[in-house]
Image (cartoon, grey):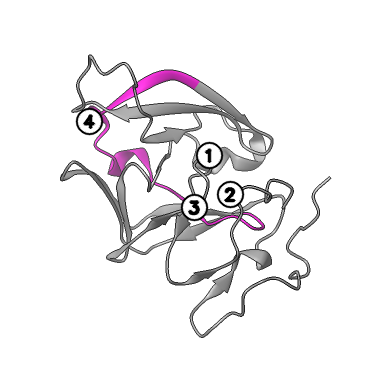
Amino acid sequence: MWRYNGSVRPDFAEPVGPGQESVWDYPRPPVIREDSRNIRVTIADELVADSQACLRILETAGAPTFYIPPEDVQIDLLEILEQRSFCEWKGTATYCRFVKESRNDSRSIACGWQYTNPSPAYASIQNYFSFYPAIADCFVNGEKVTPQPGGFYGGWVTSEIVGPIKGTPGTEGW
């Protein structure tokens, strides 16, 4: 079904420099890697998460996604939404929003998500949170993260990542 699976970089992959990694070397299905770098998330100048015990999910053509243990997240600043989505690998995601936004805001914009009952292969991310860098200010060792292109994906793009990265029109089959 998938055209690329991390075994060979496509001809259009960007060159990898020192200290960088190509999203085209990430596998499919995705893998989970421990990450001890400092991960911080703020929204409206409020510290929402701060951790050095995260899990990073790597998938072919996508920017990494950081999952933060619930004990390192200010859960009282978040409200669980009715919004759900399904990932073919991880299962059903539950979304949350930042509660300091007006409760009368009918948009109820999701700032992050978690898997409360992930598929067995991804059990280690159960109840961990991830956040959209397009909504929240996310940092990896002090470097501000850029959102993965598109708006659907929640990947975290840093200077260590080279692509191109899926998310823009025409990249859905990557």
The answer to which of 37 and 101 lies nearer the viewer is 101
Taking 156 as reference, is 172 left or right? right
Chain-order first, disc 2 or disc 3: 3
Q: Look at label 4 and name its amino acid.
A: Leu
Looking at the image, the residue that sits furthest to the left is 45
Reply above or below: 42 against 107. below
Taking 73 as reference, is 148 left or right? right
- CA distance for labels 3 and 4: 24 Å
Kindly indicate whether the residue at mark 3 contacts the one at mark 2 (C-beta within 8 angstroms). yes
- CA distance for labels 2 and 4: 29 Å
Disc number for residue 167:
2
Residue positioned 39% across, 62% down in the render? 36
The answer to which of 168 and 54 lies nearer the viewer is 168
Q: Look at label 2 and name its amino acid.
A: Gly
**Secondary structure beneath disc 1?**
loop
- Estimate the x, y position of residue 113 in percent, counting from the top left: 44, 34
State the extent of the magenta-drawn residues as a range.
59-83
Residue depth check, mark 1 versus mark 4: number of the one nearer the observer: 1
**Secondary structure beneath disc 2?**
loop
**Secondary structure beneath disc 3?**
loop
Question: For mark 3, what is the residue?
Answer: 148
- Estimate the x, y position of residue 14 in percent, counting from the top left: 62, 74
- CA distance for labels 2 and 3: 7 Å
Residue positioned 34% across, 21% down in the render? 107
Question: For mark 4, what is the residue?
Answer: 77
Q: Look at label 1 and name its amino acid.
A: Phe
Chain-order first, disc 3 or disc 4: 4
Reply above or below: 70 against 62. above
**Secondary structure beneath disc 4?**
helix
